[in-house]
Image (cartoon, rainbow, N blue to C red):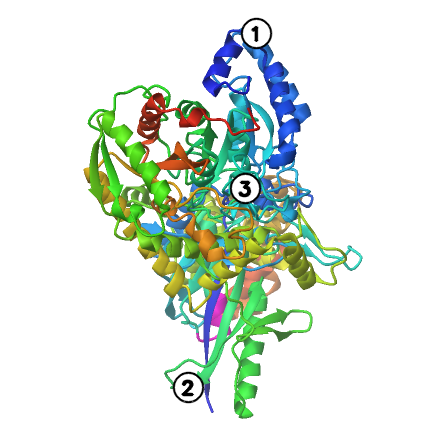
Amino acid sequence: MQWETVIGLEIHTQLATRSKIFSAASTAYGAEANTQACAVDLGLPGVLPVLNAEVVTMAIKFGLAIDATVAPLSVFARKNYFYPDLPKGYQISQMELPIVEHGKLEISLEDGTKKVIGVTRAHLEEDAGKSLHEDFQGMTGIDLNRAGTPLLEIVSEPDMRSAKEAVAYMKKMHSLVRYLGISDGNMQEGSFRCDANVSVRPKGQKEFGTRAELKNINSFRFVERAINIEVERQIDILEAGGKVVQETRLYDANKDETRSMRSKEEAMDYRYFPDPDLLPVEITAEQIETVRQTLPELPEAKKTRFISDYQLSEYDADILTNSRELADYFEDVARQSGETKLSANWVIGELSAMLNKEGKDISVSPVSADMLAGMLIRIKDNTISGKIAKEVFEAMWQGEGDADTIIDNKGLRQISDTGAIEKVLDEIIAANPQQFDQLKGGKDKLMGFFVGQVMKAMGGKANPAQVNELMKKKLA
Amino acid sequence: MHTKSLAELAEGLRNKDFSSEELTRSSLARIKQYDIQLNSFITVAEAPALAQARQADAQLASGKAGPLTGIPIAQKDIFCTEGVRTSCASKMLDNFISPYNATVVQKYNDAGAVMIGKTNMDEFAMGSSNETSFYGAVKNPWDLEAVPGGSSGGSAACVAARLVPAATGTDTGGSIRQPAALCGITGIKPTYGRVSRYGMIAFASSLDQAGAMAGSAEDTAMMLNAMAGFDPKDSTSIEKDVPDYTASLNNDIKGLKIGLPKEYFGEGLDADVAAKIEQAIEEYKKLGAEIVEISLPNSSLSVPVYYVVAPAECSTNLSRFDGVRYGYRCEDPEDLEDLYKRSRGEGFGAEVKRRIMIGTYALSAGYYDAYYLKAQKLRRLISEDFKQAFEKVDVIMGPTAPSTAFKIGEKSDDPITMYLSDIYTIATNLAGLPGMSVPAGFSNSLPVGLQIIGNYFDEARLLNVAHQYQNVTDWHRQIPKGFE
């Protein structure tokens, strides 16, 4: 039987506020345990939450960016459960009336086609603390620094049909929240993580199969692995005549397997109800407009502009707008060098390859936009050839200085002195009379041979255009 | 000194008739002498109180004193006090010392008042008799075998016995007004949002409101002046100017329209209490007030609605008491589940556990719509009744409680009968309205309280109306035998 996979994602993204969602304590990552938890975060008797206005602005930005409805009235609710790292015994979240609803996000698939993924809702909530199970002699340590950190939970429709689509969606969302400046998207620190609802059904069937929820996946690679493994598991069960149980499962990256955490029967009753300590969040149309004015250029708009302003291909524009930092880098290089296509080629080609190879982010690239633009200017003014440029780039990457310094130090300046080139050319013609006759006789392929010989003799520094020009003269 | 009103004491301090330290020592001495009988204090903060008193004396000497500077007051043990135990009358918090002050406490400190101690109460403010306290029942100074009412029973008893001139209280369903009535003192529950809830240990967040209890409307007004106001730390507190509540006390009330809801004078009301309330109404007529009969048709729903909403909110408010970070933790827990079950099972008393169970049930999947949601809808109907009434009248009057103080143990085995002792006070909490209780005579030597309910933010009028009555009566000046 042919099976179809159905996936919906719940992405938790940490909002990049300085203070917590309901208290003034800092959200900075990595502080000593329990040093960034104030009375409110600790859930002391008598304390009350006060909403950080910045999170509302961030949620509005997000809502506008995914073309969603920003709710004129949304309500915080208590999600009740006991856990040692949940100080109040409830998490303040949103249930019935979330701040953002009915959005969408377009993703590009590998074959170049587009697909729109629906976003059911996005709601604000507070994060819990952390339970530390090691180093406490069989006891559990609690660190409440993270308690009260603002999260935006983004829930998609079950619109994805493969692990690859899920990854594409997650990447697109990751790029978007960073574009908007509402999250640092740091996955190692848990600022961007997701749960995946996965089910399979016979191809053509309308009803969804029974789903499993895969918890807390914190990398793009794991999303793909976890989903694929879960899909295989479910298909195996169904093909053996069994039934998939609705349950929450955990992906174990070390063992590369998913395993059951709790079934539907064991599912908790969270007893959601509106939090009486907080007023409903009211958002006016004016407020939304004010936030709209502050929206940065979003990936789609930027891409369209890159195509029309820089005459880039859709493919190039897509890659360059993948992240705001990469797009800014490209525009900086293009503006300084005045060479858009060349800039795009170098940013997508050599630069991206090196960044990938060394696992570096564009923000810490050893070759800055200024340096790359400086080198492109030297290509443009014929100081170096494209081939030599690769050597210069390599040297810049190794920290040997800017392009001009390297060109001077290594004597890489291109030779455009016609006399010098002609002298070498004459010597080569003299040494290869037979080939020269053949070329004259119309064997055009030999043109490359002569140009190559000249370049070789001149250490690659001859201006290729001039060599060609001189050859043509010799043949005339 | 103990026979003087707060206003008189404040004047005495300003005139240097006595110092705050002398006044504070006198109050401490009375507590030492009488509280063995009453059990109205959980913690007496002698050393910090004397330190505050000396500070107050310095302020008085420098002429920078305010109306409350140097006045000893008691804080209900539900308000967090930095450095002084805050138990909420529960074993759960028997060892809890707050690292911060509640906004109310801070405001009184800033006003120069002397915090003499923390008063007894029903555990987590859940009760109408002060019998659910981990620290034992409080006795009514008018009859040591009777309850003082609750939950602010300690505050009511210590003010009635003139151990302190004034105390704070909190009122979720009548917890200021009912004990004020049963102990023969004056108490006000302001409009929801008028006083900050920050640092006041939550029972039912949408109903809880802090207020003041004192010997008279004037003293209560002075207390309210210091405690009212917007607090950025409490999202439900309201940003609205606070008037000087003493400024309008002497306003003429001629032409005042008093509404008497027929539902507050029906079955269940003690006949003698009814008679005393009617006499009080007669006094108001003499003062020129006009009496209008009104109806609050949804009154009978108040108690059932309250006993869904309040337990629902308390069931989650009290989740933080889990034995993990502070408060009571059971001995040698086997695992996490055992830690939770025994810490909470051993740390909470029976009434608290009953309400957590009721509330958990009311919020459970499948029951939420039938209970919590329904209760919230009915709550709106109850508010609507008042809204319509206040289109016709300025204030609403009736009895505060259906009877005078009952005997200790009389109702403690019957929660339903106990819950009905708040039948006339609960609706104002559900609607968020301000309400007062004012002494209006005695029935079989026990005090009767007249309840005055006002429109939103109409505390100044309530206090004015109460003060005018107290100008022509002396019920509020009576001191229980044995405490003179």
Q: Which mark is residue A46?
A: 3
Disc 3: CA contacts within 10 A as few (<14), some (14-19) or many (>=20): many
Residue A176 in view (yes/no): no
Q: Secondary structure at mark 3?
A: loop
Residues at marks 1 and 3, common chain? no
Residue B60 in view (yes/no): yes
Is B7 placed left or right of A371 in the picture?
left
Q: Which residue is mark 2?
A: A203
Q: Position of residue A319 (x, y in %)?
A: 46, 59
Give the mark nearest the N terminus, 2 or 3: 3
Q: Nearer the viewer, mark 1 or mark 2?
A: 1
Determine if the magenta segment contains residue A167.
yes
Q: Where on the picture, by quarter, is residue A31?
A: top right
Q: Position of residue A126 (x, y in %)?
A: 51, 51
Is A316 placed left or right of A243 in the picture?
left
- Chain letter of the residue beneath label 2 in the structure image: A
Determine if the magenta segment contains residue B196.
no
Q: Quadrant of the N terminus of chain B?
A: top right
Which amino acid type corresponds to the residue marked 1 in the rendered image?
Ala
Please give the range of residues in magenta. A161-168
Residues at marks 1 and 2, common chain? no
Q: Main secondary structure of the magenta part?
A: helix
- Relative depth, front residue between A369 and B187: B187
Q: Are marks 1 and 3 in contact (CB under 8 Å)?
A: no
Q: Which residue is mark 1?
A: B61
- Relative depth, front residue between B382 and B322: B382
Q: Is residue A192 above or below residue B103?
A: below
